[in-house]
Image (spheres, helix red, strand yellow):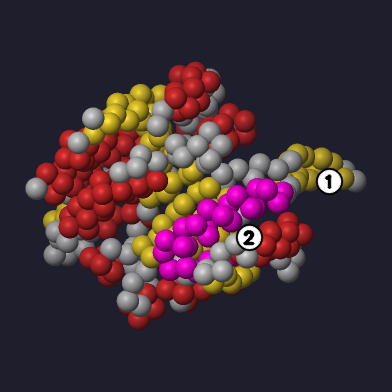
């Protein structure tokens, strides 16, 4: 019987609540599919600052490197907002991505049929279906570039540097094209090549990589136009390939098309294939401890883990089907409408497990 070791980073705010439900679902799935899961819990973010004085303890890095994959809840909160930049919870998140070599972030934005009415977009704009995969470069660009403060003619100033190398662009582009080959065979590369030199190199490099994928249709779009097109005609997109900062913004925008940010999972992958899986929403400290958070994004992140890191695609499909079935009857408060039964975070996890156990 195959056994998998999973590092668990519950994090801050609603993190522990949603991760607990995802683990519950994974345990049921494992029993159903004939494998076992062993968990190693460790600290990241604000809880790590409180316990160890830093957002990313060395012990956490070691445990994540030793695991087959890592499951993350959420980090951050107002409690740590006044901390210096190197001691903010978010620094731990950037640090673990870099430590594990996770350069590709996959953020699917899809609409479950039963949630079509929850989308802020009209049905005629959504079209027959919506299934977008945003592929975001994760360890380069402005978030990792040189930064600092200075004084110019007595005026304080600050700067952040956007920089990409050809190898960095090549490896993320190949991830996007490989995914497109298994989907709709379309890649839209998003940049700001009319202004930024880094974007011009990005476009040149993606064009070269595209020559190795003649079956894939490659298009280009400026980031401002892409932001508009996502709400004007989202069904035109299949795989969206873009940089760290642009991907951060566009994937959040795409998530809202689906009706709730509480529904969107993500995968961060590197060359090892182990990966880090997390919902794209934040720690939501305002509802932490109230048992009303939506755990489905974290549960769907587990499905992505099974698909991309653990080699269990059938188990992943089982979870996605269970979530789809649950949404026809029950909803957490963030997606609840008249005609559905309102359930808590814990009850939603129970409902998914019940569908899996049938």
- Left-right relation of 175 to 299: right
Mark-to-mark CA distance, 1 and 2:
44 Å
Q: Nearer the viewer, residue 206 or 135?
A: 206
Residue 82 appears at what percent x and percent y?
57, 33
Q: Which residue is mark 1?
A: 155
- Residue 109 included in the magenta stretch of the image: no
Q: Which residue corresponds to the image point at 31% horizontal and 37% vertical from the top-left?
A: 19
Residue 98 quadrant: top right
Residue 67 appears at what percent x and percent y?
41, 28
Q: Which residue corresponds to the image point at 56% horizontal and 37% vertical from the top-left?
A: 101
Residue 286 appears at what percent x and percent y?
36, 42
**How crowded is the residue under tag 2: few (<14 C-alpha within 10 Å), some, or many (20+)?**
some
Q: Which residue corresponds to the image point at 36% horizontal and 62% vertical from the top-left?
A: 110
**How crowded is the residue under tag 1: few (<14 C-alpha within 10 Å), some, or many (20+)?**
few
Does residue 227 show up? no
Magenta stretch: give its range.
164-192
Secondary structure under the numbered disc 2 in the rendered image = helix
Q: Nearer the viewer, residue 39 or 222?
A: 39
Residue 189 quadrant: bottom right
- Left-right relation of 146 to 181: right
Is 148 drawn above or below residue 4 in the view shown? below
Q: Which residue is mark 2?
A: 209
Q: Nearer the viewer, residue 255 or 83?
A: 255
């Amino acid at each position: 019987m195959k056994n998998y070791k999973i590092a668990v980073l519950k994090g801050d705010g609603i993190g522990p609540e949603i991760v607990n439900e995802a683990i519950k679902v994974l345990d049921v799935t494992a029993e159903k599919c004939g494998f076992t899961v062993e968990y190693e819990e460790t600290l990241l973010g604000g809880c790590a600052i409180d316990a160890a004085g830093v957002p990313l303890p060395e012990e956490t890095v070691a445990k994540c490197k030793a695991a087959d994959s890592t499951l993350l809840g959420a980090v951050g909160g107002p409690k740590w907002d006044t901390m210096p930049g190197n001691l903010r919870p978010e620094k731990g998140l950037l640090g673990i991505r870099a430590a594990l070599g996770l350069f590709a972030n996959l953020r699917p934005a899809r609409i479950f049929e039963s949630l079509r009415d929850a989308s802020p977009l009209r049905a005629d704009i959504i079209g027959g279906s919506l299934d977008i995969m945003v592929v975001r470069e994760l360890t380069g660009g402005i978030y990792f570039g040189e930064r600092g403060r200075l004084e110019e003619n007595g005026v304080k100033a600050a700067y952040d540097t956007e920089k990409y190398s050809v190898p960095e662009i090549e490896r993320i582009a190949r991830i996007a094209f490989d995914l497109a080959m298994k989907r709709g065979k379309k890649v839209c590369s998003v940049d700001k090549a009319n202004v930024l030199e880094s974007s011009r190199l990005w476009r040149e490099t993606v064009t070269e990589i595209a020559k190795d994928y003649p079956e894939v249709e490659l298009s280009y779009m400026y980031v401002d136009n892409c932001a508009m097109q996502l709400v004007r005609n989202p069904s035109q997109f299949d795989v969206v390939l873009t940089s760290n900062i642009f991907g951060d913004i566009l994937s959040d925008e795409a998530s809202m098309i689906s009706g709730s940010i509480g529904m969107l999972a993500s995968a961060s992958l590197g060359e090892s294939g182990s990966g880090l899986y997390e919902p794209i929403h934040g720690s939501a400290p305002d509802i932490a401890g109230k048992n009303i958070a939506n755990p489905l994004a974290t549960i769907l992140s587990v499905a992505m883990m099974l698909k991309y890191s653990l080699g269990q695609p059938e188990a992943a499909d089982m979870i996605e089907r269970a979530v789809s079935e649950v949404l026809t009857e029950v909803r957490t408060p963030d997606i609840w409408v008249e005609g559905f039964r309102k359930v808590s975070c814990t009850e939603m996890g129970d409902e998914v497990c019940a569908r899996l156990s049938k």
